[in-house]
């Protein structure tokens, strides 16, 4: 078989089909290379240097990684932020995604009334800006603002400085983030569940299977590729989270670094500079970003291999 036959020809049998659609990919490819692929490669390169573009850079090899794990002040902040990020991710996996699949199951139940209204209610927070959401919830969690109303409602026990409590601050921030972004996994699960053929459900009903058995043995296995994709998106987004902490606390991860994430640590070191000196260290920041990239690869690749190709 010739190359022309393998590629395919257009209606006139002269121009290869690939020539007709390839130009449409060029703008997206250029955009991807300039704004995603090249910054990633350059970040890997930058992690091997110290200094900045203004004062000059010096090649130091793996010294930035060595400093990150051996200098006590840096190591303590990095592992603290890493642990907080892992906890932040775990809350999203348990709360956001589990509730998302629960809501999706309810929304795809044909006997449920007002499904369109509930879908809209669940998805509305996604359309709000993170800074707006964070500021509003910061006011709601402030006992000065919400205390009188909660007391009148008989919920005085909830009048607490939640965002000022080291033990509760990160949980509150994570739950607010779950509330805002729950609409995305819910809608993805809804689309996946609606794509399941009714023949399977009818066959299970004929065999006497109940709703729980149908979900665990038919629906969940059939939407596993979507489950894997949502897990990957949650993993990647949470290990790059920054804006919700910035909106509700600050870039220092207050109180006392209890809400410090990898994203806020990277910002302080690589862009803004650590207090009290305030001099950015792009090389050390790039080292943090490089480690995060490989951590994401360790989580994403096995998940793709475990969930891809399932029918």
Image (cartoon, rainbow, N blue to C red):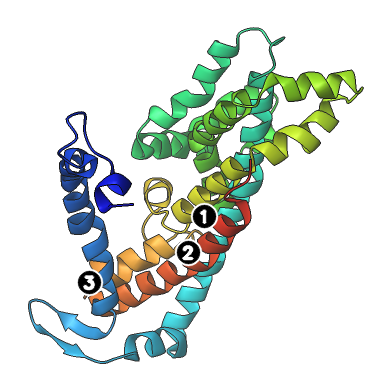
Spot occupied by residue 186 in the image (x, y as percentages of width and height)? 56, 31
Is residue 70 rendered to the left or right of residue 278?
right
Q: Are marks 2 and 1 in contact (CB under 8 Å)?
A: yes
Spot occupied by residue 177 in the image (x, y as percentages of width and height)? 50, 42
- The answer to whether residue 252 is seen in the rendering is no
- For marks 3 and 2, give the CA distance: 18 Å
> Which residue is pictured at 15% across the width and 43% down the height?
23
> Which residue is pictured at 39% across the width and 61% down the height?
263
Is residue 267 rendered to the left or right of residue 170?
left
Is residue 241 rendered to the left or right of residue 122?
left
Residue ranking furthest to the left: 54
Could you tell me which secondary element the residue under label 1 belongs to? helix
- The answer to whether residue 285 is seen in the rendering is yes
Residue 42 marker:
3
Residue 296 marker:
2
Spot occupied by residue 187 in the image (x, y as percentages of width and height)? 53, 28
> Which residue is pictured at 85% across the width and 20% down the height?
205
Q: How many marks?
A: 3
Residue 235 marker:
1
Assess disc 1: are there few (<14), some (14-19) or many (≥20) residues with their C-alpha within 10 Å of its C-alpha.
Answer: many
Spot occupied by residue 298 in the image (x, y as percentages of width and height)? 52, 68
Residue 280 marker:
none
**Upstream in sequence: badge 2 or badge 1:** 1
> In the figure, residue 280 lies in which quadrant?
bottom left
Q: Give above or below for 232 relative to 79.
A: above
Q: Are marks 3 and 1 in contact (CB under 8 Å)?
A: no
Could you tell me which secondary element the residue under label 3 belongs to? helix
Could you tell me which secondary element the residue under label 2 belongs to? helix
- For marks 3 and 1, give the CA distance: 23 Å
> Which residue is pictured at 45% across the width and 35% down the height?
139
**Upstream in sequence: badge 3 or badge 1:** 3
> In the figure, residue 9 lies in which quadrant?
top left
């Amino acid at each position: 078989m010739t190359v022309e036959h393998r590629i395919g020809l257009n209606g006139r049998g002269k121009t290869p089909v690939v020539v007709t659609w390839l130009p449409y990919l060029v703008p997206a490819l250029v955009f991807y290379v300039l704004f995603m692929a090249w910054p990633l490669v350059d970040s890997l390169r930058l992690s091997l240097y110290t200094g900045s573009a203004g004062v000059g850079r010096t090649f130091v090899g793996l010294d930035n990684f060595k400093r990150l794990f051996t200098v006590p002040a840096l190591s303590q902040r990095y592992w603290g932020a890493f642990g907080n990020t892992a906890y932040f991710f775990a809350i999203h996996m348990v709360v956001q995604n589990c509730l998302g699949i629960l809501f999706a199951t309810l929304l795809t139940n044909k006997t449920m009334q007002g499904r369109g209204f509930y879908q809209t209610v669940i998805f509305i927070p996604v359309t709000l800006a993170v800074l707006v959401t964070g500021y509003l919830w910061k006011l709601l969690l402030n006992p000065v603002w919400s205390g009188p109303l909660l007391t009148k409602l008989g919920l005085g026990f909830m009048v607490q400085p939640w965002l000022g409590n080291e033990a509760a601050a990160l949980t509150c921030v994570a739950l607010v983030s779950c509330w805002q972004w729950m609409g995305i996994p819910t809608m993805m699960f809804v689309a996946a569940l609606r794509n399941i053929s009714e023949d399977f459900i009818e066959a299970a009903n004929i065999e006497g299977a109940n709703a729980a058995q149908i979900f665990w043995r038919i629906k969940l296995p059939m939407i596993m590729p979507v489950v894997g994709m949502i897990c990957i998106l949650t993993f990647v987004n949470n290990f790059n989270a920054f804006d919700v902490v910035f909106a509700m606390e600050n870039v220092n991860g207050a109180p006392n670094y209890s809400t410090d994430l990898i994203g806020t640590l990277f910002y302080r070191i690589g862009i803004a500079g650590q207090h009290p000196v305030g001099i950015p260290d792009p090389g050390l920041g790039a080292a943090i970003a490089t480690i995060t990239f490989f951590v994401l690869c360790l989580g994403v690749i096995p998940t793709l291999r475990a969930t891809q190709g399932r029918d």
